């Protein structure tokens, strides 16, 4: 019996270590891809690809007209608003309020720090690279800042993925966790695609925003897991601590009845 328990604990330990190994490999790959993309953009190697994609999304002979019907253009403007400051701030505030109402103060503070840190990183990156906006086609949305990386794409990734991670952690079932994360990923992708469709960003701007935002959200996820282990942040609902105040149902072997303990 003792050997079986020891073998089980060893297997669980190895599984956890393997999960973290994959996590670190994915994070390193994201940073490597972002570094390679940034280098190519700075050298101008992506100009031809950027121009080809932007032109492919415009009606031949009329660069002011994006391909597709009028409702598709209107949808593009609606989707791009999901990555705007007003919408992201509102979404963050609502989820922060949700955590506050559930008395998960540490999760609320961590969320605000994660999103705030992403905003700072995005602003710094734009100031450093100062890439001009596309002048190949008319813009379908008002823009004021530099082009690289896409602020909408990066902040959508930072905000929605961070929100997704923190909300998914408190969901009781794996199905709900997957649904929350898939929703966050889809919203992030749609915001980035809309920026290229409206002609306000080069495709590589959006790709850099996705990579940078996803890497930051991954760092936040890893940090949240570590803080939860140390008791500095509320644990994952699916893995409550042993001393949590929860209900447990035990079987009374003496008479076969089920008793409810607090």
Image: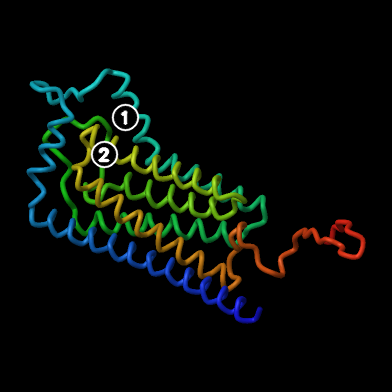
The one nearer the camera, 142 or 102, is 102
Residue 38: quadrant of the picture: bottom left
Q: Report whether 8 appears left or right of 124.
A: right
The one nearer the camera, 54 or 236, is 236
Residue 257 locus on image (x, y percent): 89, 57
Q: Is residue 242 above or below residue 74?
A: below
Residue 177 locus on image (x, y percent): 53, 49
Q: Report whether 75 appears left or right of 105.
A: left
Residue 152: quadrant of the picture: top left
Distance from label 1 to label 2 (Cα)? 15 Å
Q: Which residue is mark 2?
A: 143
Q: Which residue is mark 1?
A: 76
Q: Residue at x 28, y 62 (%)?
A: 29
Q: Report whether 246 appears left or right of 8.
A: right
Q: Residue at x 40, y 40 (%)?
A: 187
Residue 222 locus on image (x, y percent): 45, 65
The quadrant of the picture occupied by the C terminus is bottom right
Q: Residue at x 65, y 63 (%)?
A: 240
Q: Is residue 35 above or below residue 144?
A: below
The quadrant of the picture occupied by the N terminus is bottom right
Q: Characterize the local packing of mark 1: few (<14), some (14-19) or many (20 or more) Cα atoms within 10 angstroms.
A: many
């Amino acid at each position: 019996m003792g050997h079986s328990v020891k073998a089980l604990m060893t297997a669980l330990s190895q599984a956890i270590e393997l999960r973290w190994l994959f996590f670190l490999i994915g994070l390193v790959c994201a940073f490597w891809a972002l570094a390679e993309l940034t280098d190519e953009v700075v050298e101008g190697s992506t100009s031809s690809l950027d121009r080809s994609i932007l032109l492919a999304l415009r009606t031949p002979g009329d660069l002011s007209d994006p391909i597709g019907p009028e409702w598709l253009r209107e949808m593009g403007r609606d989707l791009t608003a999901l990555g705007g400051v007003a919408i992201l701030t509102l979404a963050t505030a609502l989820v922060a309020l949700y955590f506050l109402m559930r008395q998960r103060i540490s999760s609320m503070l961590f969320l605000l720090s994660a999103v705030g840190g992403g905003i700072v990183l995005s602003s710094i990156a734009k100031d450093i690279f100062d890439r001009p906006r596309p002048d190949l086609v008319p813009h379908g949305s008002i823009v004021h800042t530099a082009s690289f990386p896409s602020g909408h794409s990066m902040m959508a990734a930072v905000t929605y993925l961070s929100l997704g991670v923190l909300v998914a952690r408190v969901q009781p079932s794996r199905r709900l966790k997957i649904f929350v994360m898939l929703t966050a990923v889809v919203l992030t992708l749609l915001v980035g695609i809309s920026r290229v469709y409206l002609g306000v960003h080069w495709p590589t701007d959006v790709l850099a925003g996705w990579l940078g935002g996803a890497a930051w959200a991954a760092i936040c996820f890893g940090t949240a897991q570590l803080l939860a282990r140390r008791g500095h942040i509320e644990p994952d609902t699916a893995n409550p601590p042993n001393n949590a105040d929860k209900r447990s149902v035990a079987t009374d072997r003496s008479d076969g009845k089920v008793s409810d303990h607090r």
